[in-house]
Image (cartoon, helix red, strand yellow):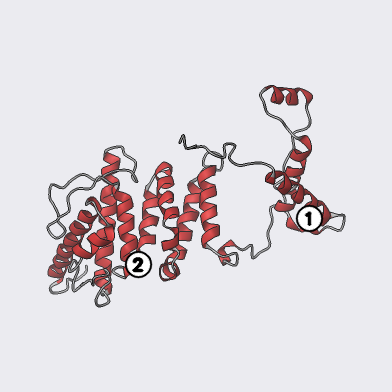
Amino acid sequence: VGSRTPGGEEMASDFERQRATAEDRLGAIVRAPGDVAALARASLDGAAGSLRLDDAGAPVDPPSAEDKTLLEHALCRVMFGLIEEASARAAAVMSHVASSKGATDKRTGATNASEPSMPRLLDLALTLSETGVVETACVFNALEQLVETCTIADCEDVFTWVEARRGRLSADALWRRGKLVMLRTCNELQRRLSKTADTVLRGRVLLLLSSLYPLSERSALNLGGNYNAGNTTELDHADAAGDASAKAEGVVVDRAFYETFWSLQKFFSNPPAALEPAAGWKTFSTSLGSVLDNFETRRLNPNPNPNPNPN
């Protein structure tokens, strides 16, 4: 049986009171219109312990670990409250506008917002992480919890926010503490995505990872030199009836390019094959050059001016 520390209940009650105050102020910022950073400067001064903010929104004195924990806990509760509210209304998490609590924030004079609330909360977490009000990894922890909770459709919207804030998230001060959390978040999301139904989002995640992490990143290296040589590709054999059917549907199949393109899979699944003495490298480089040359002749957007100016 655990023993109670004298004054423990009072300490817990004091923490809950401060947490509730911080939660109310953070919720008011998320629901209010206007710049998140400006609202945070006005509303969070004195929100936890001895927290005092300067004109730039940074703490005058470094917050204590307890104050940071309190604010992060309050921020997390606001986030899950928004998730529950969006779920109850069958709304997308990233486009849901939080309902009014029937009060205007006395410190900011702000009224209810018409902007989606979750992007504002993530912007708030990012701003507080940048200014040192909370731990620098706070925004990454919030993203991880949000992605774990969301559906795949909602995760796609969350990822759009991440892509738009990539420059700020990858700043050295934040990235040193958050890069492992971000990597874990992306890897967990990849495991949830279907390899056939979610190819676009999987590609976006991989592109983000490749832009954020250097090629020397240990997690991206094949340190064991293991290859999946059993990943073979079976080519469709030339079929006059099939080619005629494809042409009837307006699809032109370049049989030579088709075979050249998929022949590269042999080298990608087993890279040492490119170094085989029997013209391995020559075959690989010739095929790869042919494929890249073909890609250069294909325009990604068939309409170079999708929104022509009628004037």
Measuring from the top left, give residue 305's x and y in whole percent: 54, 39
Q: Residue furthest bottom?
A: 61
**Residue 265, visible in the rendered structure:** no
Local secondary structure at mark 1? helix
Circle 1 packing at 10 Å, graded few (<14), some (14-19), many (20+), is some
Q: Is residue 245 above or below residue 284?
A: above
Measuring from the top left, give residue 210's x and y in whole percent: 55, 58
For the point 81% across and 56% down, the residue is 281
Which of the two labelled residues, at mark 2 and mark 1, occupies the earlier sequence position? 2
For the point 56% across and 43% down, the residue is 195
C-alpha separation, residue under disc 2 versus residue under disc 1? 48 Å
Q: Nearer the viewer, residue 54 or 74?
A: 54
The mark found on residue 8 in the picture is: none
Q: Nearer the viewer, residue 69 or 168?
A: 168
Look at the image and tell me in which quarter the C terminus lies: top left
**Residue 242, visible in the rendered structure:** yes
- Horizontal side of residue 112 vs 191, given as left or right: left
Look at the image and tell me in which quarter the N terminus lies: bottom left
Q: Residue furthest front?
A: 311
- Mark 1 lies on residue: 273
C-beta proximity under 8 Å, tags 2 and 1: no
User: What residue type is disc 2 on?
Assistant: Glu
For the point 78% across and 32% down, the residue is 237
Measuring from the top left, give residue 141's x and y in whole percent: 37, 60
The mark found on residue 130 in the picture is: 2
Circle 2 packing at 10 Å, graded few (<14), some (14-19), many (20+), is many
Q: Quadrant of residue 220?
A: bottom right
User: What residue type is disc 1 on?
Assistant: Ala
Q: Nearer the viewer, residue 67 or 7?
A: 67
Q: Residue furthest right?
A: 278
Local secondary structure at mark 2? helix
